[in-house]
Image (tube, rainbow, N blue to C red):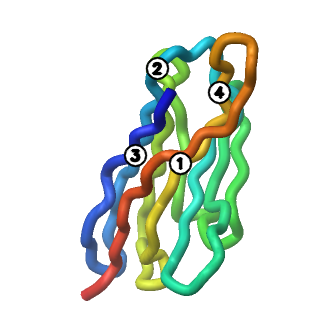
Amino acid sequence: VQLQASGGGLVQPGGSLRLSCVASGSIVSVSAMEWYRQAPGKMRELVAGITFGGSTNYADSAKGRFTISRDNAKNTIYLQMNSLKVEDTAVYYCYAEIQNGIMWNDYWGQGTQVTVSS
């Protein structure tokens, strides 16, 4: 099982990016899926999460600007980021709780760099 994140890049303040994260491999079921980010010199922090049923939660810094969504048929989550700020610059990681066989395990993607700069 692996998570593959993509969609990062360089964008100007006020711009938008859409991140994607696909879970692949021997997957029986996927439960919660989340986006985290880690800026240089800072702790990794939760940005947004979504349950299998579509319930969402957001960090205060993301509310009103970011939208998390998922496609259960594709084991994929997305993070639409609008009105980006310089302080959103970080490596963004996806996380998922995945049932592989009879066991549930935590998986992390490799990270995708988001840089907001003029």
Task: Determine the CA span between mark 3 and mark 1.
Answer: 7 Å
Q: Which residue is mark 1?
A: 94
Give the residue drawn at x 36%, y 65%: 113
Camera-nearest label, 3 or 2: 2
Q: Would you say 70 lies left or right of 53 here?
A: left
Q: Position of residue 53 (x, y in %)?
A: 71, 25
Quadrant the C terminus occupies? bottom left
Secondary structure category for the residue under label 4: strand
The kind of residue tagged 2 is Gly
Camera-nearest label, 2 or 1: 2
Q: Disc number at residue 25? A: 2
Secondary structure category for the residue under label 2: loop
**Crowding near the residue tagged with mark 2, few <14, some 14–19, many ≥20 C-alpha atoms within 10 Å:** few
Task: Determine the CA span between mark 3 and mark 2.
Answer: 15 Å
User: Dots 3 and 2: beta carbons under 8 Å?
Assistant: no
User: Dots 3 and 1: beta carbons under 8 Å?
Assistant: yes
Q: Earlier in the sequence, mark 2 or mark 1?
A: 2
The kind of residue tagged 1 is Cys
Task: Determine the CA span between mark 4 and mark 1.
Answer: 12 Å
Q: Foreground residue, 112 or 77?
A: 112
Task: Determine the CA span between mark 4 and mark 2.
Answer: 10 Å
Q: Earlier in the sequence, mark 4 or mark 2?
A: 2
Q: Earlier in the sequence, mark 3 or mark 1?
A: 3
Q: Position of residue 99 (x, y in %)?
A: 68, 20
Image quadrant where residue 54 sits: top right
The kind of residue tagged 4 is Ile
Q: Which residue is mark 4?
A: 98
Give the residue drawn at x 43%, y 56%: 111
Q: Which residue is mark 3?
A: 5
